[in-house]
Image: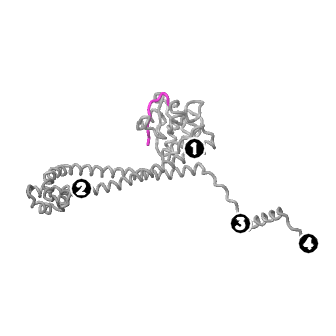
Amino acid sequence: MTTPRSGAAKARRLVSVAVGIALILGFTAVPAEADPSVKELEKKIEKRAEELEGTIEDYNAAREDLDKTKKKIKKLDKKLAPYEKELDKLYDKAEPIVMAAYQGQGLTGPTAMLNSDSPEAFADKISALDGLSAGDAGLIGKVAKKARAYKSKKTDLEELKDEQDKKESDLSKAKKKIEKEIEDLQGDRKTTIKNETGADYVPDYVPGKRGEVVRHAMAQVDKPYVWAAAGPDGYDCSGLILDAYRQIGISLPHNAARQYGQATHIGKGDLQPGDPVFSNGLKHVTMYIGDGYVVHAPTFGQPVQVAKMDTAASPYYGAGTFL
């Protein structure tokens, strides 16, 4: 006599069968997607930055086109104004005569007559009316024709302006969207680096040559200060700047004052990552990396480090750029 299996035994048998089927068919568990690495995030920033640059150029072109169209409309308005003014005077003269002639015929005004397609048609319609000469009628027709021509051009330009307005608006939205994506990617990158290194401050990832300069200088953090050295094992202040810029093919003198002489001088408010900041009577130079921070080789006994610009570049002398 066969003993019925218990519920627990049946459950174990079903699990065993399921596992066996999975092994036979080669099913495997899908691993959780890993967070992107710093390098992957930087590649994404580079890509979106390229897209942003193209979008900004398209936006600038669209804005220039729109400005040109607005100027054309303004110019047409100036040309149209005297014709409209003259028409107002002539219509004021013609309206009571036309109204009197059409009284009782169901017309509310002289609109139909005054909007004749040609000066000749207008003159023909109004010449039979007493009180208005054929000369006045012809003049109204001619002025009206000229005004209609300008208005037609203006209508075309206003339609073009509407299209350009929309294009500018669409590009502005696309620009803001990309900027937000880059901002989020920068935040993810900073968080990843801080978690991996324990750094208090991480500068934004900067694409292009400026970024190469900043990243090279940042890679030297914690290397010792060595007088008259420009790497790779140690640096003095101007040697760090020299070494960073030679990575992108720019040759600089190994002297802070002479680097200042070679730089294009800029104001504090114009500083961008990679720009040199000079202090202490041109006896010290640091590199701006963003958010009010610099990277520099301070002095004997202090390694290459990141510091607040107001502290590291004091007393401030000036700023420059090589790019």
| Between marks 1 and 2 in the image, the one whose residue lies nearer the viewer | 2
- Label 3 sits on a secondary structure element that is loop
| Between marks 4 and 2 in the image, the one whose residue lies nearer the viewer | 4
Q: Amino acid at mark 3?
A: Gly
Residue 39, image x, y percentages? 58, 50
**In the rendered image of this protein, does residue 213 appear above or below residue 160?**
above
Q: Earlier in the sequence, mark 1 or mark 4?
A: 4
Classed neighbour count for the residue bearing mark 2: other residues with Cα under 10 Å, few (<14), some (14–19), many (≥20): some
**In the rendered image of this protein, does residue 122 appear above or below residue 188?**
below
| Residue that carries the numbered disc 2 in the rendered image | 151
Q: Earlier in the sequence, mark 1 or mark 2?
A: 2
Q: Nearer the viewer, residue 54 or 245?
A: 54
| Residue that carries the numbered disc 1 in the rendered image | 190
Q: Earlier in the sequence, mark 3 or mark 2?
A: 3
Labelled pair 3, 1 in contact (Cβ < 8 Å): no
Q: Quadrant of residue 298?
A: top right
| Residue that carries the numbered disc 3 in the rendered image | 26
Residue 164, image x, y percentages? 35, 54
Residue 74, image x, y percentages? 26, 49
| Between marks 3 and 2 in the image, the one whose residue lies nearer the viewer | 2
Q: Amino acid at mark 1?
A: Lys
Residue occupying the point 19% across, 51% down? 84
| Residue that carries the numbered disc 4 in the rendered image | 1
Q: Amino acid at mark 4?
A: Met
Q: CA distance from mark 3 to mark 1?
A: 40 Å
Residue occupying the point 71% across, 66% down? 26
Q: Residue extending furthest right?
A: 1
| Between marks 1 and 4 in the image, the one whose residue lies nearer the viewer | 4
Q: Check the image and tell me how it is coloured.
A: one colour
